[in-house]
Amino acid sequence: MHEVTLGMNGTTEDIIVLRDLSKVYKDGVEVLALDRINLDIAAGEFVAIVGPSGSGKSTLLNMVGLLDTPTSGQILLKGIDVSRASPNERARLRNKELGFVFQYHHLIPEFTALENVMMPMLIAGKKESEARVRARELLVSVGLGERMDNRPNQLSGGQSQRVAVARALVNGPSIVIGDELTGNLDTKSSQLIYDLLRDLNKRINQTFILVTHDMVLAEKTDRIIRIVDGRIVCEMRRQGDEFVASEKCDLGEDGGEIRRD
Ligand SMILES: Nc1ncnc2c1ncn2[C@@H]1O[C@H](COP(=O)(O)OP(=O)(O)OP(=O)(O)O)[C@@H](O)[C@H]1O
Ligand SMILES: [Mg+2]
């Protein structure tokens, strides 16, 4: 890893900068899953990534989350080029800088909610007493103060996802990424989770990048990035209650409406 000078719009306040990022899957038929993506995400942004199935949303999140490596291009995390960091270094950065919430909560069934939330802190080498205090605080802040000692099978789907959100936050990550994190929840629970994330974004300036198929949920964020065939085709930003498309938008036939897939 080495420090790089940021060009274009990148500033050191950008937590994530992607430069001409491409990903080709080569198992069997070659698939160009990401095609020269350029994207800057600043600290405190609340971002949704939308687009049709197979458009490259998960691939993009896997890049930002340092779960996979690009075929070409750069990923800068807090100004440092991590595109070709070793697996060990990527694992260290994931634990320290990134929080993850997936469609399935991936909580450890034998552990209580509290123990599940403490786990990333223990992996980071923090003291158990410190982890316990922090995990308790976070569970209270996601509305689960009364459920800390329940195991995942004693929690509802929405409650389990709240635990997963608390776990994602426990090491104070620079960025939290979520891939269809409400994909298994009903509409009301999904909206409550997004309201919770919105609240955390405002309260602690937590940066979120969330993939969703659901435009109603995407419209709860501040910035919507639409991907089609591995390219960013449109970006919209909140201005008050409205979303305004950037000049770069290739809106095609829908003429400015936010598309609902
Ligand atoms: N491990 C892989 N090996 C080969 N091809 C892959 C792999 N993962 C994804 N792809 C392909 O890359 C493209 C982008 O996939 P990706 O999973 O990023 O889409 P997505 O936008 O997340 O879709 P969905 O909304 O269905 O989750 C698709 O054509 C997919 O088939
Ligand atoms: Mg996906």
Image: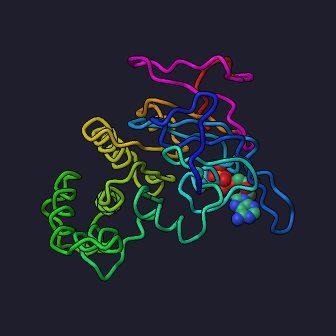
Give the quarter of the image for residue 229: top right
Measuring 34% from the left and 47% from the top, which residue is drawn there? 193
Q: Position of residue 219 (x, y in %)?
A: 45, 31
Measuring 54% from the left and 71% from the top, which residue is drawn there? 88
Q: How many circles with numbers are drawn on the protein?
A: 0
234 versus 116 height, above or below: above
Give the quarter of the image for residue 109: bottom left
Task: Name the colouring of the figure.
Answer: rainbow
Does the stretch in magenta take in 146? no
Q: Position of residue 36 (x, y in %)?
A: 74, 41
For the C terminus, the quadrant is top right
160 versus 183 height, above or below: below
Measuring 65% from the left and 16% from the top, which residue is drawn there? 247
Which is more toward the observer, 68 or 209?
Answer: 68
**Magenta residues, start to end:** 228-253
Does the stretch in magenta take in 245? yes
Q: Is residue 11 left or right of residue 106?
A: right
Q: Position of residue 50 (x, y in %)?
A: 58, 40
Q: Is residue 173 left or right of residue 81?
A: left
Q: Position of residue 155 (x, y in %)?
A: 27, 67
Measuring 63% from the left and 32% from the top, which residue is drawn there? 7
Residue furthest right in the image: 29
Image-quarter location of ligand 1: bottom right
Which is more toward the observer, 41 or 114?
Answer: 41
